[in-house]
Amino acid sequence: MSSTTPPPSATGDGIVVRDLHRAFGTVRALDGVGLTARAGAVTALVGPNGSGKTTLLLVLAGLLVPDRGSVSVAGHDPVAHGPAARARTGWMPDTFGTWDSLTAREVLLTFAATYRLSPAAAAARATDLLATVHLSEYADRPASVLSRGQKQRLGLARALVHDPSVLLLDEPASGLDPRSRVDLRILLRRLADEGRTVLVSSHVLSELDEMADDAVFLSKGRTVVPDAAATGTTSWHVRALSLDALTTWLTSTGATWQPDGAAVTQTGAGGVLLDMDGDDDAARLVRDAVAAGVPLVSLVPAAGTLEQAYLTLEEERR
């Protein structure tokens, strides 16, 4: 896809949600959700199954009417100003649904027509997007022959066909191979850098960690904030060429450590898991270890920032 200029419909409004409620009978799928997703940024939507992520995305896409609360997508209410909001929104559900008898190109042309692109513009857009998601060789094959991952890529192309300023992606990396996951991260970062608003829901927190600028956490239909005090202390993988030298030195400093089952030992290096209070403690450990002659090899967090924050959610412990 061309990355020359932001789409004409791009605005600085992004997504703004206030006190959003939606129930299905006695089940409160959304129970007072509030969030802001900035234009020009990738926002991660994080939460367990049943937390309300998909319901929220359906409301933002204009496919579900909320019971109460306010929603603004690129400056438009999806209920009161549905056509204007949808014209600026690209929606990718977690499961790709299409007419299997249509080719990949025909799928994109059909959706381009619904957004009233001219035939010439639609044809050029389809060719461009198929190349972007690496499906050019499948362009004229029926969608029924595509694998799960290939259908996911086609679903992303479909969401981009009308050059939206807001992207809503529900588990976009599901079924993708490692190369395609990397391509997805690069593409989403590029789209955000163009000024678009990108809201991504995924259970693969390591993927989100590498692309997200902001994060919103949902639990039991509510927006929740990770325990800041709990996230201060995290586990780090600490490896050295000599495990004995490392553990002897750590013991002498009074540090509490445990063997690191994930440490790579093929080179003879060994490692431990060590709890530290953030980057400042990690920097001090490197400085002191080098001064003591400990042959450090690496020092990395045992889990990504989003995973650490997710695990501190008090709501999920109840």
Image (cartoon, grey):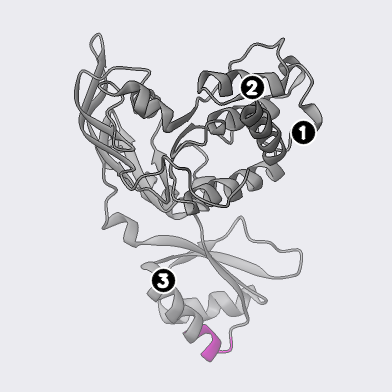
Q: Callout 2: helix, strand or loop? A: helix
Q: Callout 3: helix, strand or loop? A: helix
Q: Which residue is mark 3?
A: 279
Q: Using the numbered discs, state the Cα–Cα distance from disc 3 to disc 1 in whole angstroms.
A: 45 Å
Is-magenta flag for residue 291?
yes
Q: Which residues are magenta?
A: 288-293
How far from the left and from the top, in percent, is residue 54?
40, 25
For marks 2 and 3, give the one nearer the viewer.
Answer: 2
Q: Closest to the observer: 166 or 168?
A: 166
Query: Of the numbered discs in the image, which one, if any, rests on residue 26?
Result: none
Q: Closest to the observer: 305 or 179?
A: 179
Q: Residue at x 66, y 77 (%)?
A: 242
Mark 1 / mark 2, whichever is N-terminal: 2
Mark 3 / mark 1, whichever is N-terminal: 1
Whether residue 54 is visible, yes or no, is yes
For marks 3 and 1, give the one nearer the viewer.
Answer: 1
Q: Residues within 10 Å of mark 3 (few under 14, many from 20)?
A: few
Three-letter amino acid code at disc 1? Ser
Q: Residue at x 68, y 28 (%)?
A: 123
Q: Closest to the observer: 318 or 89?
A: 89
Three-letter amino acid code at disc 2? Leu
How far from the left and from the top, in percent, is residue 11?
36, 45
Q: Is residue 201 left or right of residue 266?
A: left
Query: Of the numbered discs in the image, which one, if any, rests on residue 136?
Result: 1
Query: Of the numbered discs in the image, which one, if any, rests on residue 109?
Result: 2
How far from the left and from the top, in percent, is residue 79?
28, 21
Q: Callout 1: helix, strand or loop? A: helix
Whether residue 57 is visible, yes or no, is no
Above-or-below relation of 266 to 202? below
Mark 2 / mark 3, whichever is N-terminal: 2
